Amino acid sequence: MVLAEHYTLSNGVEIPKLGLGTWMIEDDKVAEAVRSAVAIGYRHIDTAAIYKNEAEVGAAIAKSGIPRDELYITTKLWNARQTDAHTAMRESLDKLQLDRVDLYLIHWPTPEKDTYVGAWLDLEEIQAQGLATSIGVSNFMPEHLDKLVAQSSVVPAINQIEIHPTLQQRDAVAANEKFGIVTESWSPLGRGKADDLTSPAVTEIAAAVGKTPAQVVLRWHVQKGYVVFPKSSRRERLEENMRIFDFSLTDDQLAAIDGLEAGTRVGPDPRTFN
Ligand code: NDP
């Protein structure tokens, strides 16, 4: 069994560098994907209220037999619940069959609604009550982080943003680093829509190091210091994606992948998504 390495968050808590993303895994496949992932060695699962699979994820981890303290479970507050975070958190915990999550994130800033600072103050209370070990945000751009940090007392531990070779969001990463926030990359493989796995820079490195393009791209993320949770419901890909801790990319190989930045989003723009 392969286990992921860890980063340490600003509050001293460890987070596995790699987990399983569960968005858009078909309803009937979520439980099997979580079961397979845990059997392979995954200990970190990323879900969200809006994925509508917290109950399936919770049932699968309850059945896994893995001690709770060895698992790292993230869920997220959906946009429509930013003024109702305490109730939304209770609902998520009930579905997950947990008395705490490891990480609770505000899913999107939805700047037009301007309710994220109030939601964050509720997350601070949720953390103080022991319902979330760490709290953080997702899709927060530098101006959203500046406002949040100026108007609250806890700095987010994590900012989960879209990152893959063709969309690197360097300004957002720099803002995270300024505040000591660990970056998580969502859609780390570009969801298969962009050129992330097929560009010659990636395929040539893959051939040189004897790994697959997906493994090279995931390794690039972790060497940049980012957490990744690629989504797959196929067992062979779950195994492939976990085997990224037994090789390293050189500085030149990292720079070649850095050179793929093209501003290609696969998801919404956080500055306009409401
Ligand atoms: P990913 O970049 O993880 O790509 C998933 C796609 O890549 C699927 O089509 C999968 O196919 C395929 N794939 C997986 N492994 C491999 C491999 N080894 N080789 C080739 N193809 C592969 O995209 P996601 O959008 O799913 O992002 C990952 C996670 O990030 C989500 O599941 C979710 O947890 C989170 N997320 C968070 C968001 C946010 O706003 N905070 C937004 C979007 C995602 P198959 O399943 O057939 O194997």
Image (spheres, rainbow, N blue to C red):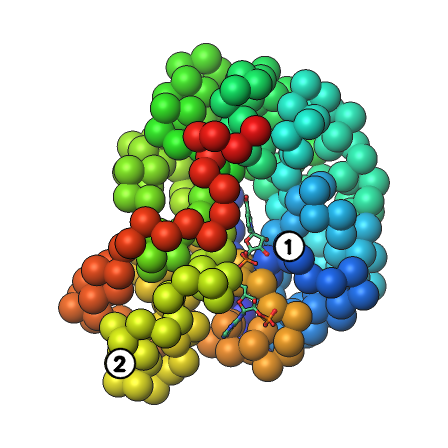
Q: Nearer the viewer, residue 66 or 143?
A: 143
Q: CA distance from mark 1 to mark 2?
A: 30 Å
Name the residue located 41 percent from the left edge and 43 percent from the top edge: 182
Q: Give the vertical position of 175 relative to 224 (above or below).
A: above
Quarter-wise, where is residue 206 in the image? bottom left
Quarter-wise, where is residue 150 in the image? top left
x and y, in percent, of residue 86 in the image? 73, 24
Name the residue located 51 percent from the left edge and 78 percent from the top edge: 240
x and y, in percent, of residue 254 in the image? 23, 64
Horizontal relation, residue 58 to residue 136: left or right = right
Q: Nearer the viewer, residue 183 or 207?
A: 207
Pick the quarter of the image with the N terminus: bottom right
Horizontal relation, residue 12 to residue 46: left or right = left
Label 2, secondary structure: give it. helix
| Label 1 lies in ligand 1 vicinity (Cβ under 8 Å) | yes
Q: Give the vertical position of 52 relative to 41 (above or below).
A: above
- The residue to which callout 1 is attached is 23
Q: Give the vertical position of 89 relative to 42 (above or below).
A: above
- The residue to which callout 2 is attached is 204
Instruction: Give the amino acid type for the residue marked by disc 2 in the picture.
Output: Glu
**Rendered-image quarter of ligand 1:** bottom right
Q: Give the vertical position of 167 relative to 213 (above or below).
A: above
Residue 248 is at least partly visible in this image: no
Name the residue located 16 percent from the left edge and 68 percent from the top edge: 252
| Label 2 lies in ligand 1 vicinity (Cβ under 8 Å) | no
Residue 116 is at least partly visible in this image: yes
Name the residue located 26 percent from the left edge and 81 percent from the top edge: 204
Dot 1 or dot 2: first in sequence order is: 1
